[in-house]
Every structure is written in structure tokens, then in C-alpha cells.
Amino acid sequence: MAKILPVFQQLAPIDKEPFITNVLVVISLLTQSYYSHENCCEIITYPDGFTPLWLVQKQQKEITKLETEVFIRCIQPVKRIDLTKEEYVLIKAIIFCNPACSNISDAGQQLLEQECERYSKTLLRYMQSIHGGTKGASRYAQVIAVMEAMAYFAERLREFHLIRMIQRAQEAKRQGQKSRAVYVIDDLF
């Protein structure tokens, strides 16, 4: 989706990579949560039916609080307000245009701020056209709260992956194997 946003084409080439990597985990989690909710799933479920929690359960008997947050609770904010497809698309655009991105030039941040404001106003106007002035503003606040919840759960997902990387390195060391290389996906977390 990032490439189809007009702001992506306006960003300097040096700003494009940080633009994507700064929001990738949040966007991924929002997409997984929305998809799972749309398909009436209580846990994160991929389009092919795979559930990442299955891998965790296969390796250990009990699910930790962190795993519960990462694979189950993250769906609840989307489910609670029954996020619509239109709201989902607009909130995704707002997240992509988050001006609080690190490693982006001042000019890039200014562009992102303008686009974020534009998409936020579009979402608010859309909510108010559907629900009326006051109820629309209230619904807008609920949708923005989903965005904040996704940022929280994305941090928990980063913690989960960090713990898994450490566990894999410790297991490799115990078995006398060389620890595996850190891949690009690990850098995102």
C-alpha cells in the first residue's frame, strides 16, 4: 500500500526505506487483526488458515501473557468497535503517514505530517457524514484508539520476536552450533 500513497512518490529516495520500516510492524499487525476479525477468528489467522499461535503451542504447553497479547488480544480493539473496511483503509493510511518516524529528513516529516492531517480529516468527515456530528467525532476517537492499541501491540510483538531470537541463540549454543545470522525481518523487530 505504501507505494500507492501519493506521499511515497514525493519522498526523497533516502526517506523511503525508513518510511516503510518504521510502520511495517504496526501495519502488519493491523492487517492481521482486521483480517482475523473479518473471518470471525478469535486468534491471529492468516488467509491460508495458518495460526502462528499453533507453532508456539507446539513448542510449549502454556501460552504466556506476551503471546496472548500478540496473537489474541490484538484483535479485540478491532472487534470491539467492529472496524469497517473504509475505516480500516483510512486508519492504515494515517499510520503510514505518521510524522513521528525516525530517520526521516525534516522535509519528509513535513510531507508526512501534511498527509497524516489530510487522511485524519478525511476519516473524521467520513465518520460525521455517516454518524452525524457528535457521534461521528466519538466514532473517530474510537478508530484512533485502535491505531494507538496497534502501536502498543506492535511493541509487544517486537518483544516477542526479540525473546524468540535470544531463545534460538541460547538453544544453538547449548547444542554447540553457531548462532544463526540476523535476517532483515529480525532487524524490523
Image: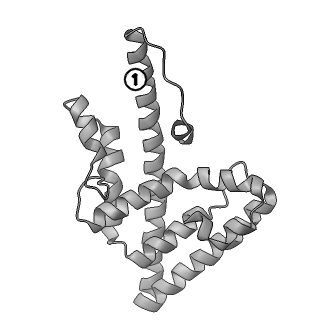
Q: Quadrant of the N terminus?
A: bottom right
Which amino acid is tagged 1? Gln
Instruction: Give the class, few, some or many, for how many residues have Cα within 10 Å of label 1's Cα (few <14, many ≥20).
Output: few
Q: Which of 89 and 101 lies nearest the eye of the viewer? A: 89
- The residue lying at 37 percent from left, 57 percent from top is 32
Q: Secondary structure at mark 1?
A: helix
Return the x and y of residue 133 as percentages of the image width and height: 48, 89
Q: Is residue 101 visible?
A: no
**How did the renderer colour the structure?**
one colour
Name the residue: 47% across, 87% down: 128
Residue 188, above or below 35: above
Side (left or right) of 22 relative to 87? right
Give the image quarter of residue 109: bottom right
> Residue 112: where, in percent of width, then height?
69, 65
Residue 139, position in %: x, y? 42, 77
Q: Identify the residue shown where x is 68% and y is 66%.
A: 8
How far across and how far down the image is residue 30, in percent? 43, 59
Residue furthest left in the image: 61
State the residue position of label 1. Answer: 167
Q: Is residue 50 left or right of residue 17?
A: left
Relative to 5, 84 lies left or right: left
Q: On screen, 33 above or below 127?
A: above
Name the residue rendered at 41%, 16% in the picture: 172
Q: Nearer the viewer, residue 106 or 65?
A: 106
